Image: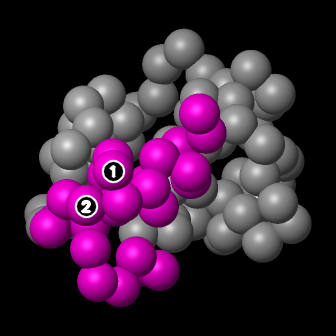
């Protein structure tokens, strides 16, 4: 199951109160995680990935085995990274 599908499934992450409501605000995190795990990105996702990372290339098809994040407080790091591993 792709991350995007799990995120919107009401039986998985879509039911979690932290991810309910305006799910559009999670698009940058979903795009980043999809890129990390090598999931395909649509044209909008590729554009968002480039704008957010400053990279001028598409993520590799297999993703990366390791990534480093430099983000501020209250950016949703914990929720975004826990969501990938633990549904609900």
- Relative depth, front residue between 36 and 68: 36
Name, please, the residue furthest toward the top.
65
Q: Name the spot of residue 46 as percent of width and height, x first.
A: 78, 60
- Image marks 2 and 1: residues in contact by CB distance under 8 Å: yes
Start-end of magenta stretch: 1-25
Q: CA distance from mark 2 to mark 1?
A: 6 Å
82 over 66 or under it: above or below: below
Say whether residue 76 is visible.
Answer: no
Horizontally, is 66 left or right of 59 in the view? left
Instruction: Give the residue pinned by disc 1.
Output: 11
Magenta highlight: main SS: helix
Image quarter hosting the C terminus: top left
Name, please, the residue furthest toward the bottom.
22
Q: Residue at x 16, y 66 (%)?
A: 18
Q: Name the spot of residue 67 as percent of width and height, x first.
A: 47, 28
- Relative depth, front residue between 35 and 23: 23
Secondary structure under badge 1? loop
Q: Residues within 10 Å of mark 2 (few under 14, many from 20)?
A: some
Image quarter hosting the N terminus: top right
Please give the label number shown on residue 42. Answer: none
Q: Residue at x 41, y 69 (%)?
A: 26
Please give the label number shown on residue 15. Answer: 2
Image coloring type: one colour
Q: Is residue 69 covered in magenta?
A: no
Horizontally, is 27 left or right of 75 in the view? right
Task: Residue 61: name its quadrant.
Answer: top right
Q: Name the spot of residue 76 as percent of width and height, x first.
A: 23, 60
Secondary structure under badge 2? helix
86 over 27 or under it: above or below: above
């Amino acid at each position: 199951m792709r991350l995007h599908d799990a995120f919107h499934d009401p039986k998985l992450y879509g039911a979690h109160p932290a991810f309910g409501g305006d799910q559009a605000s999670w698009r940058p995190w979903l795009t980043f995680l999809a890129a990390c795990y090598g999931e395909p990105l649509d044209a909008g996702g590729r554009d968002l990935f480039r704008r957010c990372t400053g990279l001028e290339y598409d993520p590799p098809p297999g993703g990366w085995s390791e990534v480093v994040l430099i983000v501020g407080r209250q950016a949703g790091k914990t929720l975004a990274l826990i969501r990938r591993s633990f549904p609900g």
